[in-house]
Amino acid sequence: MRFLVFIALAIAVISCTCAEIRYDFEDGTLQGWKVLEGEFGQLIGSREFQFNKRTERYTQDGKYYLTTLEQPGGKHPSDRYMGIIESPLVCLTSPKISVKVGGGAHEAVGFSVHLENGQALGFARGENDEIMRVRVLDLPEAVGKRVYFRIFDEHEGSWGHVTVDSVVCEGEELAEESRARFAARTLELSRRSESRVTLESLRKGIESIWRCFPGEYPGEALLSELSSLGKDDDLREFSLRALVRMNPVVNSAPILFVTRKQFRVDHHNTATMFQTGEINTRSYDTSGCLKQLDVKTGLVTSVFAPGSGCTVRDPEVSFDGKQVVFSMRRGADDDYHVYTYELSTGKLVQLTRAKGVSDIDPLWLPDGDIAFTSTREPKYCMCNRHIMGNLYRMGPDGSNILQIGKSTLHEGHSSLLPDGRILYDRWEYVDRNFGDAQGLWTCNPDGTNHAVFWGNNTTSPGGVIDARALSHPNRVIAVLSSCHDRPWGALGIIDRSIDVDGRDPVLHTWPEDFRKKITVEGQSFDSTVSLKIKYEDPYPLDDGLFLCSRQVGRGELMGLYYLDLHGNEVLIHVEAPGCYDPMPLRARTRPPVLATRRNFEHQKAKGLVYLQDVYVGTHMKGVERGSVKYLRVVESPEKRNWTWGGWQGQGEQAPGMNWHSFENKRILGTVPVESDGSAYFELPANTFVYYQALDASGRMVQSMRSGTYVQPDEAQGCIGCHESRTASAELIVARPKAMGRAPSKLDGWLGEPRLFSYQREVQPVFNAKCIKCHDYGKPAAKKLNLCGDRDIVFCASYVDLWALGYVKCVGGGPAAIQEAGSWGSKVSKLTQVLEAGHKDVVLTDEEWARLRTWIDINAPYYPVYESAYPDNPGGRSPVTRDELKRIKELSGVEVSLSWGKRQRSQLNFDRPELSAILSARPEHREELLTLIRQGRDRLKAVPRGDMDGFVPCAKERKRELKYAERLSIEHQVYEAIKSGKKCFDKE
């Protein structure tokens, strides 16, 4: 690692007082230590038990210790944090330094001792476990000299953290000298971070501008002045003058920007709305206004100041440069709404005003309408508890607010492509990991033709957001962000004509070395969290010059910056509490208006989907032509409710839904695939679906792991099964056979379409054919229990089939493309054993269909996200947290709420006396049995979501009423558009 040296000092022996110095953090503070680089979640830890071995105690002295692992709010520990923490200066009188250190053994993490000039004298590290061990460093060369201790964490992989306690030495802590040293270090780091320019980057930047503006830009004079500067000169003032204030691209119009505090840290980069009535509403604490900067003079003037406690965000200048549209919140009791502001008159018009919804990211459309992101269809992220938003559009007067995006999580940061399409970032996942499922997408302004642009299967960066187009038709600049961070990170220029995923299409990044972290492998979806300097709000001035907001090197403070492709990063302006959303305040080219390709019959009117050839595409390698006979159409519904209790699958399910993945499913039907690979069928509009290719036996060959939807009367087409989106379609020499007939109609699955329930659809097969042998108390159940008795979250058979490996499903698997036939009923142990012949078991065609279909749609369990026990463990358990804690005390067994332990069912709420946990400590059997019977009785009185008679809890019924109300309002919009009328928001 590279150590920063802030001043050259002669190291001499000095006299100092001899006393014990102990940093044990027992007052719950850093005891004078400072974070000098990076950022951390919760540096002072107080964990009692290890997080991997939960019955073994942590090994700190006392209660508190220092850690780079913990996250705030008791969230799951994370190795993503990186940075440097240093102690005050100490004058040593003894050579021995004792420290307790644990965590990683990697060379990039640990504890170290340094002379005042930065020279490292000794190191101590952990052993890739959670035990803090005493290390004693013997450093006679440090006696009588000033030293400091450093905790460094520059590794975000496995065991990329360090824990430290009880740093003990003899000597004297030097308070005044420490304050001076910290101030000097902070100033040096700030100056180094404020602007990044070199003599060479300045020369290239000046030459580039001069070539474009030979008559307007004094390039020759500036290069001459540059040649007189030395390598040690402060280049900040010169770079501001040469690259910004004298640059015709930048100084031809004022820069509009927003002032506000950085949003508080929350769950995901989408969590900045802090909507009233939602889980994080108390995190709203920003305040700010709209300003403009005269680039030539540096003069800043106010454009619109709404007052204390009000926040302006997401401004967008109209095409004629006369108006600004933005989102504003008038305090903690309000929510974000969309406004327009007329620059010449100061006229402010509120366009949206619905209560209990957030409207952000407004965008002028080519026809004068406005698109924006809104929570008007209230839904929550499947991997936690936070409100999400979709794309909407409305008239310039706020009329006829219409939903044009229907994905199951979040659609945001919309902008326009030169051809008139909307470019936006979209977070959604089907049968895949949540953390890297946020890429760039496009659609037409009427909501048709939603298609991936870039990054949907790229694991690092985990979030690709806030993109804007360059003049090149396939190039954009975007924020390369993380799943668990604010909406900032690195910046990248992406050319999707090269590919739609991976490193090759990313032509340039800020910082430059981030490009090497871009990958489609692994799960590095928080790779930008550790960046020492983060960027957001990129705005291209041309294809090589950009504005953005960026950390200036003083904590979270953001300034306005000028970037180019030569390595220059020049601070244009900074003021507290921070500067965001820079853009030129001038007229700009209006993209073409695209024709409307839909109607407004009603929300669920039919659209059409046609597939040219299912065998074409990156996902169908090795699939024999003629083997695919059907397409199954499966709906993945939105999540409308959440619980406090959760199940740890791929991420936290709240409530528990499935063993590993997040979604519930509804099979809408199957349609035929013709001999040439074509298909043609109807699809209900505004329904988020995915497709599965099936063989003649109805077994899945390949499955989408993202979703799609159509608008009423939209005709949506694709070339093949996940075809290369950068390749041209092969010449069609004959009309696809499916197009020569009427479109197929969806026919349901073993009856009408319904939410898939394991207990209703699958367990009856085991009840009829398996439990005479595979039930509690029978020898075969020791290997596999197939009874449907309910446990803490699921049931015995479901848990065993997953935990013991009888189903091979992708779960909430990786972002990487899965090869055809690599998972599903074709390769699962359960179906293979039955197909080979197992005892006298003979399944009917319908029973085979139930088992195979269940596995092929990723072996889900619950049909609904709603819960009867929202505050209890897993969001499903009939026993409370305290009762579960007592069960652990009595039995010595921790009932797992995570797939990772692969623990078989311990509790039985149908036949309590058969609960496996009763055998752990026979002396406590009766009290344990009483607790489990209480759970049984509660389920009889209040059935949960996998039982007949289930009714959601009162809070969730209230959310359902809100959802129905919003759906009714959307219906009114359809009716108004059909009849040529207007309807508006009501407060």
Image (tube, grey):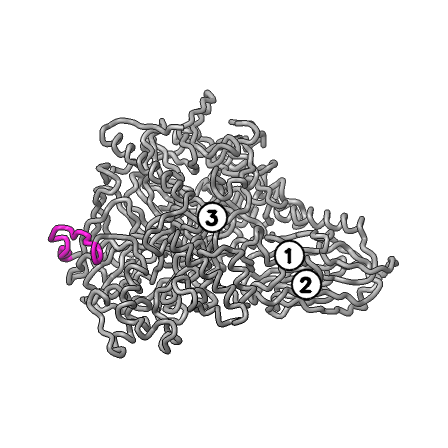
Q: Residue at x 48, y 62 (%)?
A: 930
For the residues labelled 1 and 2, the Cα–Cα distance comes to: 10 Å
Q: Earlier in the sequence, mark 1 or mark 2?
A: 1
Nearer to us in this view, 421 or 22: 22
**CA gap, disc 3 to disc 1?**
32 Å
Asked if residue 626 is positioned above or below residue 872 in the image, the reply reads below
Q: Which residues are magenta?
A: 733-751
Task: Indicate which label's residue lies in the foreground, 3 or 2.
Answer: 2
Amino acid type, label 3: Val
Camera-side residue of 44 and 291? 44
Mark 2: amino acid: Gln
Visible residue check, residue 254: yes
| Residue type marked 1 | Gly
Label of residue 479 in the image: 3
Instruction: Inspect this view and state whether residue 436 appears.
Output: no
- Rendering coords of residue 325 (x, y %): 43, 31
User: What is the C-alpha distance between the residues marked 3 and 2?
Assistant: 40 Å
